[in-house]
Amino acid sequence: MTLGLLELLARYVFNNVRTTYIGKTARILHHRIKEHNNPKANSAIQMHKKEHPTHKIDATNIEIIDKADNNFKLMLKEMLHIIKHKPELNTQHASQNKNEKTFKSQLNTIIIGRQV
């Protein structure tokens, strides 16, 4: 896979389980997957793998679910996809909660940060 020229949003699926994760990257997707598989990484994927050592990212089941030409657009798309798909490992996002006020606050923070 040599994708990565654009900003990508990918959905990762773990083998033999229905656990998913949605994440964005501007790098080559293959390199990002290797980072996720690094046991020293501090990420939701590594936390899950430590709790469930038999679970591995299924490299044949990674789906590019969206693209954007800049990080700001991709951040917005990431939040919307997390709301829509409710991936189990994206618990760190306020958009995962059903609290609309929290989501709007986070969205305003992103928009204000973009304007600076």
Image (cartoon, grey):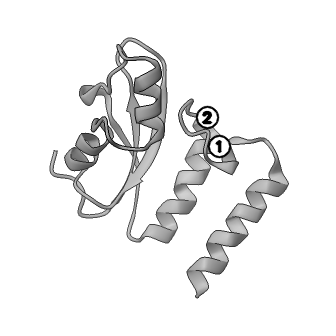
Amino acid type at circle 2 is: Lys
- Residue of label 1: 83
85 sits to left or right of 35: right
Tell me: residue 75, above or below residue 18. Answer: below
Q: Residues within 10 Å of mark 1 (few under 14, many from 20)?
A: some
- The extreme bottom residue here reads 116
Q: Residues within 10 Å of mark 2 (few under 14, many from 20)?
A: some
Q: How many marks?
A: 2
What residue sits 48% from the left and 23% below the top?
19
Tell me: residue 107, above or below residue 79. Answer: below
For the residues marked 1 and 2, what is the alpha-carbon distance in whole angstroms? 6 Å
What residue sits 55% from the left and 33% below the top?
87
What residue sits 66% from the left and 79% below the top?
112
Where's residue 54, x and y in %?
35, 13
47 sits to left or right of 39: right
- Asked if the residue under mark 2 is in contact with the one under mark 1, i.e. CB atoms within 8 Å, the reply is yes
Where's residue 92, x and y in %?
61, 45
Q: Nearer the viewer, residue 25 or 3?
A: 25
Image quadrant holding the N terminus, namely top left
Q: Give the numbered dot on residue 114.
A: none
The image quadrant of residue 58 is top left
Q: Nearer the viewer, residue 64 or 104?
A: 104
Where's residue 109, x and y in %?
68, 71
Secondary element at image label 1: helix
Amino acid type at circle 1 is: Ile
95 sits to left or right of 12: right
- Residue of label 2: 86
The image quadrant of residue 57 is top left
Secondary element at image label 2: loop
The image quadrant of residue 46 is top left
Where's residue 9, x and y in %?
41, 50
What residue sits 61% from the left and 51% below the top?
80
